[in-house]
Image (spheres, rainbow, N blue to C red):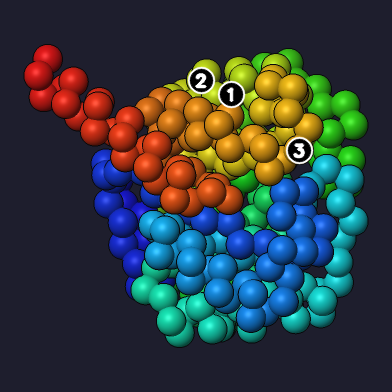
C-alpha cells in the first residue's frame, strides 16, 4: 500500500506513522492558547519533529464540540506563517487541518503536503479537485453533524457499517474528481459525532476498514471518551488512556495515529511493535 503526498511517498506495511498535533488556536479543547503565537508554534513544531513526529498537523480553527467557526482570513493569518516557516526547516510532511478551500490552497502554496479535512462529508467537490491539482494527500474524516452540534445526540443504526459505507462512497466520489486512491487516508472520526459506545465499537472493529486498502488514521489523543471511561475530566491528564488507545489502534488496523504527545506515543508504539515482531519471528 502506497501513500503519496506531493514529494513524499510512504509504503506500508511499516511502523505506524505518528502525526503530531500543532494547534495554533486560542480555544482547542486540549492545548488551546499554548502555541497561539507564530514563534511559539514554530518552536513547538520543531520540538515535535525532534521527538519523532512523522507528520505535523497544523490547525487554526478549533473543532472541539461546541466550537464556533472562525473567518477564512483569521484562520489563514494563524496557520500560514507557521506552515511556511516549518516547511522551510523540516523534511517531514506538513498537514493543514482545515475545512476551508481558501485556507487549504494557501497552505498548499506555503508548503503543506496534506489536507486534513474533518468535513469530508461535504457536497462541494472543489476541495478535492484542489488537492488533486497539487498532487497532495487528503485525510477524509467521518463526522456526523458539525463541530457546534455534533455531540448533541449522535445516532447510528450500526456505526461501523455506516462509516464503512461512507468511506466507500467518498472514495468513489474523490477518485472521480481526479484524487487518486494513493493520496487518500481514511479517518473514522473519533469524538466527532460519536458516543462513548460508538467509539468503543469503532476501535474494536478498526480492521473492518482494511478492505479499502488505504491507510487508516485514528485521532483519539486526550479525547473526552477517555475521560468518561477513566473519570479524568482534564484533557492534560489523559495520557495513559491516549497511549493505550494508540497502541490498540495501531495493532488492530490503523497505520497512522494523531497525537499531542509525540515522544510518549512513539515509545509506546515502538515497544508494542517490537513485541509483536518478536512473537511472529518465534512463532
Residue 121: x %, y % from top left: 70, 46
Residue 197: x %, y % from top left: 70, 17
* Residue position marked by numbered label 3 in the rendering: 234
Tell me the residue at 90%/31% (across/down).
152
Marks 2 and 1 sit apart, C-alpha to C-alpha, by 5 Å
Tell me the residue at 44%/50% (across/down).
263
Please identify the residue farthest to the front as the structure is shown.
237
Q: Is residue 85 visible?
A: yes
The residue lying toward the viewer, choosing from 118 and 129, is 118
| Left-right relation of 74 to 210 | right
User: Dots 2 and 1: beta carbons under 8 Å?
Assistant: yes
Residue 183: x %, y % from top left: 43, 57
Quarter of the rendering occupied by the C terminus:
top left
Helix or strand or loop: what does disc 1 sit on? Answer: helix
| Left-right relation of 63 to 261 | right
Tell me the residue at 80%/22% (across/down).
155
* Residue position marked by numbered label 1 in the rendering: 202
Q: Is residue 44 above or below residue 225?
A: below
Q: Earlier in the sequence, mark 3 or mark 2?
A: 2
Helix or strand or loop: what does disc 3 sit on? Answer: loop
Q: Which mark is residue 205?
A: 2
Residue 163: x %, y % from top left: 62, 30
The residue carrying pointer 2 sits among few (fewer than 14), some (14 to 19) or many (20 or more) residues within 10 Å by Cα, namely some
Please identify the residue farthest to the left as the structure is shown.
282
Q: Quadrant of residue 280?
A: top left
User: Dots 1 and 3: beta carbons under 8 Å?
Assistant: no
Amino acid at each position: 500500500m502506497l501513500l503519496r503526498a506531493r514529494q513524499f511517498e510512504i509504503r506500508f506495511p511499516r511502523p505506524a506513522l505518528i502525526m503530531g498535533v500543532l494547534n495554533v488556536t486560542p480555544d482547542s479543547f486540549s492545548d488551546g492558547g499554548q502555541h497561539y503565537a507564530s514563534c511559539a508554534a514554530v518552536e513547538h513544531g520543531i520540538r515535535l519533529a525532534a521527538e519523532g513526529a512523522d507528520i505535523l498537523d497544523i490547525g487554526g480553527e478549533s473543532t472541539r464540540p461546541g466550537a464556533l467557526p472562525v473567518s477564512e482570513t483569521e484562520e489563514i493569518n494563524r496557520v500560514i506563517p507557521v506552515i511556511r516557516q516549518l516547511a522551510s526547516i523540516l523534511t517531514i510532511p506538513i498537514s493543514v487541518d482545515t475545512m476551508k478551500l481558501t485556507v487549504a490552497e494557501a497552505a498548499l502554496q506555503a508548503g503543506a503536503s496534506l489536507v486534513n479535512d474533518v468535513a469530508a462529508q461535504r457536497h462541494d467537490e472543489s476541495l478535492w479537485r484542489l488537492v488533486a491539482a497539487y498532487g497532495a494527500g487528503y485525510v477524509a474524516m467521518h463526522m456526523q453533524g458539525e463541530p457546534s452540534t455534533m455531540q448533541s445526540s449522535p445516532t447510528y443504526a450500526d456505526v461501523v457499517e455506516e462509516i464503512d459505507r461512507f468511506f466507500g462512497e467518498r472514495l468513489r466520489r474523490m477518485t472521480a474528481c481526479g484524487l487518486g486512491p494513493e493520496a487518500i487516508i481514511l479517518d473514522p472520526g473519533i469524538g466527532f459525532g460519536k458516543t462513548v459506545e460508538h467509539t468503543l465499537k469503532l476501535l474494536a472493529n478498526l480492521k473492518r476498514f482494511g478492505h479499502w486498502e488505504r491507510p487508516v488514521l485514528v485521532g483519539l489523543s486526550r479525547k473526552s471518551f477517555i475521560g468518561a471511561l477513566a473519570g479524568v475530566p482534564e484533557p492534560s491528564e489523559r495520557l495513559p488512556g491516549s497511549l493505550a488507545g494508540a497502541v490498540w489502534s495501531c495493532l488492530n488496523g490503523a497505520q497512522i495515529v494523531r497525537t499531542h504527545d509525540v515522544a510518549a506515543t512513539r515509545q509506546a508504539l515502538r515497544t508494542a511493535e517490537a513485541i509483536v515482531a518478536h512473537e511472529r519471528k518465534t512463532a
